[in-house]
Image (cartoon, rainbow, N blue to C red):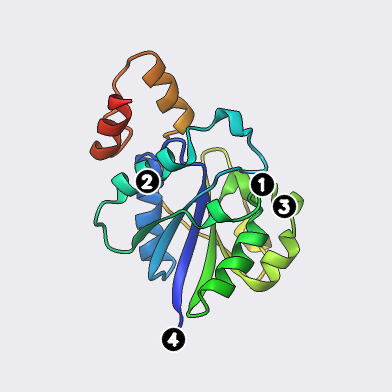
Amino acid sequence: MKKRTGIYGGSFNPIHNGHMQLARGMLQVAGLDEVWFLVTPQNPWKQKADLMPDDYRLQLVRAAIGEEKGLVASDFEFQLPKPSYTWNTLQALTAAYPDREFVLLVGGDNWTRFAHWYHGDDILAHFDVMVYPREGDDIDAETLPPRVRLVDLPLVNVSSTEIRQRLAQHLPIGHLVPKAVEELLLKK
């Protein structure tokens, strides 16, 4: 039986408590064996100039996860062509790990523009997609395609942008990020 593996791609610029809570929740409610945090070197929707270095963001994700069972930090996209299109990543993952069934985890904000994703229809035809709503998202579960499921998880209103702003203003971030991440960010 294939391991059901959630793919949680993102910039994680930096990773925060909301990311962690979501991944833990997905493990429970989406029937996943693992959640892989795929650190994205270049999201087609975001400017690379706004990102911390790739290896540093990966280091932060590894620090956040620590030894937590079921959560994995991955640099898989670092070796793929840029920008990081999800369809290409899912195809490469499927080829590299035939013992796994990959499930795409996306936020409601991404779901609302999914029709504009590169090969979005192919993703929907070949992979299950779990959508977690975010504040202000209006997604009707009754209208979702067959392989797409809306997941009911508590919302955590934290953003990486807020954390970067607080760091720039020398304000505390300990309530927004895991302790190990806070320590690394404050050292830099």
User: Outermost residue, front direction?
Assistant: 79
Measure the alpha-carbon separation of dots 4 and 1.
33 Å
Badge 2 amino acid: Val
The residue type indicated by label 3 comes to Trp
Q: At 43% across and 42% down in the image, what residue appears?
A: 55
Check disc 3 and report the residue beneath it: 117
Cα separation, mark 3 vs mark 1, equals 12 Å
The quadrant of the rendering that contains the C terminus is top left
Label pair 4/1, CB-CB below 8 angstroms: no
- Circle 1 crowding by C-alpha within 10 Å: few under 14, some 14–19, many from 20: some
Residue depicted at x 67% and y 61%: 87
Q: Above or below — where is 122 with respect to 84? A: below
Looking at the image, tell me whether mark 2 or mark 1 is earlier in sequence order: 2
Q: Amino acid at mark 1?
A: Pro
In the image, residue 70 sits, relative to residue 55, either above or below, namely below
Is disc 3 placed on a helix, strand or loop?
A: loop
Mark 2 — residue? 61
Question: Mark number for residue 83?
Answer: 1
100 shown above or below 105: below
Q: State the residue in front, 74 or 102.
A: 74
Pinpoint residue 184: horizontal percent, then vertical percent: 29, 33
Sequence-wise first label, 2 or 4: 4
Real-space CA distance between mark 2 and mark 4, rounded to the nearest whole angstrom: 28 Å
How packed mark 4 is, by other alpha carbons closer than 10 Å (few <14, some 14-19, many 20 or more), is few
Using the numbered discs, state the Cα–Cα distance from disc 2 to disc 1 in whole angstroms.
20 Å
Across and down, in percent, residue 83 comes to 66, 46
> Which residue in the protein does label 4 denote?
1
Q: Residue at x 61, y 70 (%)?
A: 127
**If you read the primary sequence from the N terminus, does the residue marked by circle 2 or circle 3 appear first?**
2
